Each structure stands twice: as C-alpha cells, then as structure tokens.
Image (tube, rainbow, N blue to C red):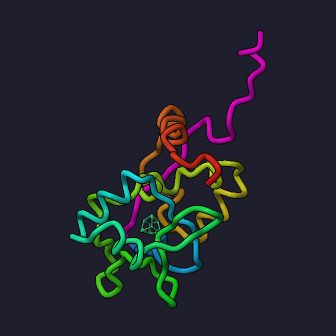
Amino acid sequence: MEDLERKEPWWADGLRFECLGCGRCCRGEPGAIWFTEREEKVLAQRLSLSPDEFRRRFVTSRYGRPSISERPNGECSLLDGDKGRCTVYAVRPLQCRLFPFWPSLLESPEAWEEGSHRCPGMNQGRLRPSWLIERLLKASPFPEL
Ligand code: SF4
C-alpha cells in the first residue's frame, strides 16, 4: 500500500542532457566544488603536488567544507582558462562528473529550469531515464549539494 502511495519524482519521465563543452559550469558565479579526501589525494598526485601544496594553491572553504577555489574572474582554479578545459578532467571530483544531476537541481522543475539558464546542455540531447537519474542522485557524496 505504502509503495502505491509513494509519489513519483517530477523527473520520472527522464531528463535530457548533453554536455556541449562550453565550460560555463566551470566559470561564473562562485560555487562549491567539494571533494572527498581520496579525491584530494588523486588531484594532488595528478598535479605532482604534495597535499599541502595542493591545498595552498587550489583549495578554499565553502559552506564549512574544503572546496576548489576560484580565480578573481570566477573561473575554477583548475580550469585552463584559455582552452576552456579542465586540467584534471580524467580525475575530476565526482561532484563535477555528476553535474547537472545534483540534488539541488533535481529538487524541483523550477530549480532544473533555473540551472538550464546557466548550462545550455540541460534539456538537450539524450534522454536520461529515471533509473539512471536515481542512480546518479544516490552516487552523490554530498546529498546536501
Ligand atoms: S555548462 Fe553544461 S554544456 Fe557547458 S560545459 Fe558545463 S555541463 Fe557542459
């Protein structure tokens, strides 16, 4: 009975998303790019830096957690600004990989719509089925994001 009454999420029919590679999600308004301890180690290794040096050069704090810092122009400090490419793409934090399937953007159609004004890939391209969205949501290491 309880199962029958469970409300379907607003994205039950799936959502379209295809990254267009514009790099806008790595620029603009400051945001929180959180990472786990393991991800931090991997990022530092990738850049041939000690964890301390990595923290000194690339980490700030957002909402009480360590977060990748931004340059004064709003770019992620790990972005190659000229090429518009992530310098650690292969080992980027899971939070970046999951975008735009973040709890905060999936909270409501309005939040998703608002996000699509900043990311032109949202509502475009392949339809991502609800089972996949559910899986991505569960994978988020930061459910409050
Ligand atoms: S803003 Fe959207 S389309 Fe542009 S790079 Fe980021 S995820 Fe891809």
Who is closer to the viewer here, 60 or 80? Answer: 60
Where in the image, quadrant-wise, is ligand 1 located? bottom left
Instruction: Judge from the rendering whether residue 68 lies leftward or rightward of residue 1; answer left or right.
Output: left
> Against 144, is 70 above or below?
below
Residue 69: give x, y in percent of width and height. 48, 76
Number of numbered markers: 0
Give the image location of residue 126, x and y in percent: 42, 48
Image x and y of residue 1, in percent: 77, 9
Which sits in the foreground, 112 or 33? 33
Residue at image point 71% right, 15% down: 3
| Whether residue 26 is situated above or below residue 83 in the rendered picture | above
Q: Residue 18 or 62: which is nearer the viewer? A: 62
User: Considering the image in quadrants, where does the C terminus appear?
Assistant: bottom right
Q: Is residue 15 magenta?
A: yes
SS majority, magenta: loop
Instruction: Name the residue: 28% across, 72% down.
Output: 87
Side (left or right) of 49 relative to 57: left
Quarter residue 10 falls in: top right
Q: Which residues are magenta?
A: 1-21
Locate residue 78: give its quadrant: bottom left
x then y, percent, for residue 120: 50, 68
- The residue sitting at 62% across, 41% down in the picture is 11
Say whether residue 97 is magenta. no
The image quarter containing residue 89 is: bottom left
* Residue drawn 49% across the image and 35% down it: 135
Outermost top residue = 1
